[in-house]
Image: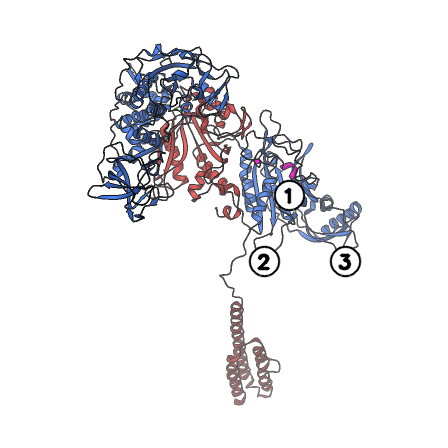
Amino acid sequence: MKLPLSWIREFVPVELPPARLAHLLTMAGAEVEDLAVLGADWEQVVVGRVASLERHPSLEALWVARIELRHAVVAVATAATNLRVGDLVPLVLPGGRVGGRTIEARDFDGLTSQGMLLSADELGLAPDRQGIYVLDVAAQPGQPLQEVLGEVIFDFKITPNRPDEMNVLGIAREVAALTGQPLTVPPLEPLAGGSPAASLVAVEIPAPDLCLRYTAAVVQDISVGPSPGWVQRRLHCCGVRPISNVVDVTNYVMLEQGQPLHAFDADLLAEGRLVIRRAWEGERIVTLDGQGRELSPEMLAIADARQAQAVAGVMGGLASEVSERTRHVVIESANFEPMSIRRTARALRLSTEASKRFERGLDPGQTARAAQRATNLMVRLAGGRAAAGLVDLYPTRLPKRRIFITPERLSTLLGKRYAQDEIAQVLTRLEFEVQPQANGLEVVAPGHRRDVEGPADLAEEVARVTGYEAIPDTLLSGRLAEPRPNVARDWERRARSILVGCGLQEVITYSLVEPSTPARLDSRAPWPVPSTVAAPGLASPLDGLVRVANPLSAEQSALRTTLLASLLDILRANLRHSERVAIFELARVYLPPLAPLPREMRHLGIALAGARAPRAWNREQGELDFFDLKGVVEGLLRALGLGAARFRRAAHVSYHPGRVAEVVLPVAGRPEVVLGTLGQVHPRVAERFDLQGRAVFAAELDFEALASRAGEVGHAAAPPRFPGVEVDLAVQVQEAVTHEEVHAVLIAAGGELLDRAELFDVYRGEALPSGTKSLAYSLTFRSPERTLTDEEAVEVQAHIERELAHRLGATIRGRS
Amino acid sequence: MVDVQVRLEALRNRAVAELRAVQDEADLERWRIAYLGRRGALAEVTRGLASAPASERPRLGQAANQAKQTLEQAFAECEQRLKVAALERALQAERVDVTLPGRPPALGRLHPVTHVMEQVVRLFERMGFQVAEGPEVETDYYNFEALNIPRDHPARDIWDTIYVRPPEILLRTHTSPVQARVMEQQQPPVRVVVPGRCYRYEALDASHEWMFYQVEGLAVDEGITMADLKGTLTAFARQMFWPEVRTRFRCDYFPFVEPGVEMSISCHACKGQGGPCAVCRGSGWLEILGAGMVHPRVLEKVGYDSERYTGFAFGMGLERIAMIKYGIEDIRLFYSNDLRFLQQFP
């Protein structure tokens, strides 16, 4: 909300520098977002008096004006036709600047124009581009224009609880309270002399629940025309377009007093009646913006004897709009129920300066004053006669809310002791009624402060006016609640640090994805999704995602159920410039159905592609593969105390069928728990993410399952005390036999004396029969109680070898 | 028999002199064979002792032994000298260009928002706050109603909302709904911080994101005041930013607090001097969070006695904190996840 300082000063004689005043208001809650100076960009722009006017000797469209300055007269060419001798006009001299451009002396067929006369639009004073701006205020020729028409304009950000500040008077009231300067409201002229207003317009309120008060004034025999310059300038400073004197008066008074007004053409109101009623079902109205609108009984209409003439508190109707032919006007100054106005404005998608004020709750007490002010001003600007008195229906008076407050109560809230006198003084300055009682104050808020409901509100008034810096800074003391475990979060921290330690970069990606994401990740599904399925707004049977109702874009319109697609997008973007991309994200997925909320589950996603290690001048470059990914997952599981998890071949639509595993955790006596999936992304899926030809590896783990089963080591073992016997064993098996099967036999057959069995080589090649492979293990035999003899080790090894042969048909290489 | 002794003398002198010229192991070996070998010069002289008179033999034998010892010692010294020299040469040959780059390990890092979130949470944990969490897909009740923002209240305009199933189910617009969720579950004293994702219906530009992280804080008990709010948040700012940071509180409005404040910190770029500072746009201050005393109605809605208990709440955007801390000018950098951006953080 923009307001010129000069207007505020009409009500409070504040002399503080503008920046200081802006700071004061901002600290107290009326934030000044911007402080602009109208005319700050005028250089060498002065006031001149038109001394003479004559036609240009050769150029027909031009006039030559002799402009009197302080000590000189200059000749200026102009095409404008609105000038008269004696007018005070703005002139930019050669070398001066206005609106960001520099003006130089210019030759017009032998006549050198010493600068340029300016329009209101060129000066930024008003939108008027027609003709030269003629000053309507006293000024000396040669005086810098800034001294005469410059303005300091405050741009306020008013919080929704303070509609009383959405106007000049409200800000002035605040300034008065903050600076101690007196607030002066100029007296109004009485409405007397004409016919009684009540004889000219009849008002009835069949819907008093939605209309607290309706005040109407009448002005007869006006002449509609443009407003004078000072009104137009003020409106323009506030960002309001001047329209006509009648309409401008309603806007001017709204900006000044905060009371939205509407002017009806009195002759166009059927039977001269105004009925404040609920709209009929399906009742139609064309509003001032030219839009046809359908109303409903939840909405309040201002109707005449026949039809709705305005949407109450939102916008007037075109049918009774004030025009050049208007002779008599009815000025409406009313108070409507805030929530109803808000609902109506939202239903009609029509938020106006009026509705924004009404929906925040205005003072019903101010309508008569505003009506009278508007009437006075209209008579001044548009001529005519004011009808005597007002029509004023006030069916619903808001109850006075009495708030009892003590200095103790204030200090429990604010942590600072305020004297009762000081509290009373602050509140009185803010126009609260304050009654001292035996042990406190009884306070009634002024009508314009409908936001004040209780002691906490009064505490804020005291704190903001006396300044928050006066309140001391103390640290919390007192009781603490017992710490509550937050296991998932602790494991989240741990998991992040492990993954970072594995050389993975954490990413954070959007929770909303394209609804077609499940199909995109499904190597068997057609892609792109046939348009019949992807019709916007229809829930696809393919996806099963929770959609948002008002998405910002189609790409971000469904809640994700997997992190995979987001990670692949990030992978692709980074592979354009990075040779190694290894990322992870720990975030929620959102699983349907809405019951009423979706199930939010933490997932851990990992994606890898490119070089195994950062490129170095002294290292062989290798490419990341399945086992790099698996190594990371295994490392993570071990660090979370989940080393018992197993990997097994699995089927998953997003992954390479031969390179995908499921991670499962055996649970004693119960079904195993699936922790997640890892593998190489299916080439067809990779292609859909523009990752064609790249080996991309990804994992997605259910972090809730991980965290709920993760655990610390129960009992820590000391390092072995006795030396072990190390033996290498190369086991030749059929290709189909897995490492896990061999390893299981090793462990079972090795019994207690087998301390470790670690795979160190996998060999396939000419030295072996086709269809077989050799798995080489390093075995460590050890007894926890004594030094093992070679004979004992050999005995165990022989048993292991027999078991391998017996159970897996294995042969031991190097044995004949 | 003077002859033998003279010969020993000459032999010794010659041998020692020759040894001085020896430069490598091969020369040394040749020298050893020539003088100390079984058929070497010393052995030859010693063999000549057999023909010496018996009375002379002990003396001459002793002289020969002395000569031998001298030569062996000289040999050992020379051998040592060569070893040292050889090692010296080898070390010289193994010299590397220490300015060549090291073999880089793959380094991972936390996302800067996580990093900042952990810092914020840790600071409040040290002041006795516990971490609480809540759903991102929320009900209208917790996101608005419980926070004293009834339907059709103009304050709702503060939060442009993304709805899942309007008007009841939405994406939370702040982490504040967890306030009511926590208080419904526990009696005072309450001290919690709530980190998490939030969403707003907001077009993306350099300073606006539709998805962002907040940390909410709530402390409720008997005797908690605005002074505690100021002290706690100022202590936080000093730890989070820099020790000399100053805080400023101005009146602001959030329906779930009363009084409501906005906290700014002194600008780090101009040290709060304002002037032509691009970071704070000349104000000398940077807004970082909204806060206030919990509104009595919010306490009453969860069944707390608002006459007995008071409390404060605050909420801050983590991207904003990170932007100030690391001088980031475009919020879009966070979730576009360009590794070249992400990998600069500690």
Report helix, strand or loop for mark 3: loop
Looking at marks 3 and 2 on the same chain, the residue that comes earlier in the sequence is marked by 2
Q: Which mark is residue A766?
A: 3
Q: Where, by quadrant of the figure, is residue A569 drawn?
A: top right
Distance from Cα at disc 3 to Cα at disc 1: 40 Å
Q: Is residue A472 visible?
A: no
- Mark 1 vs 2, N-terminal side: 2
**Residue A619, numbered label:** 2
Q: Which-is-in-front pick, marks 3 and 1?
A: 1
Q: What residue is disc 1 on?
A: A688
Residue A554: percent from the left, percent from the top?
Answer: 57, 35
The answer to whether marks 3 and 1 sit on the same chain is yes
In the rendered view, does A141 fall on the left or right side of A341?
left
The chain painted red is B
Q: CA distance from mark 1 to mark 2?
A: 33 Å
* Amino acid marked by disc 3: Glu
Quarter of the figure with residue A68: top left
**Residue B169 located within the stretch drawn in magenta:** no
Mark 1 belongs to which subunit?
Answer: A
Colour of chain A as rendered: blue
- Alpha carbon separation for disc pair 3 and 2: 30 Å
Above-or-below relation of A802 to B10: above
Kind of residue indicated by mark 1:
Arg
Q: Is residue A203 visible?
A: yes
Q: Is residue B309 above or below residue A534?
A: above
* Residues at discs 1 and 2 both on one chain: yes
Foreground pick, B197 / B180:
B197
Q: What is the secondary structure assignment of the residue under circle 2?
A: loop
Q: Circle 3 marks a residue in which chain?
A: A
The coloring applied to the image is by chain
Residue B99 position within the rendered picture, expressed as x and y whole percent measured from the top left: 49, 61
Apparent side of residue A97 relative to residue B13 in the rendered image (left or right):
left
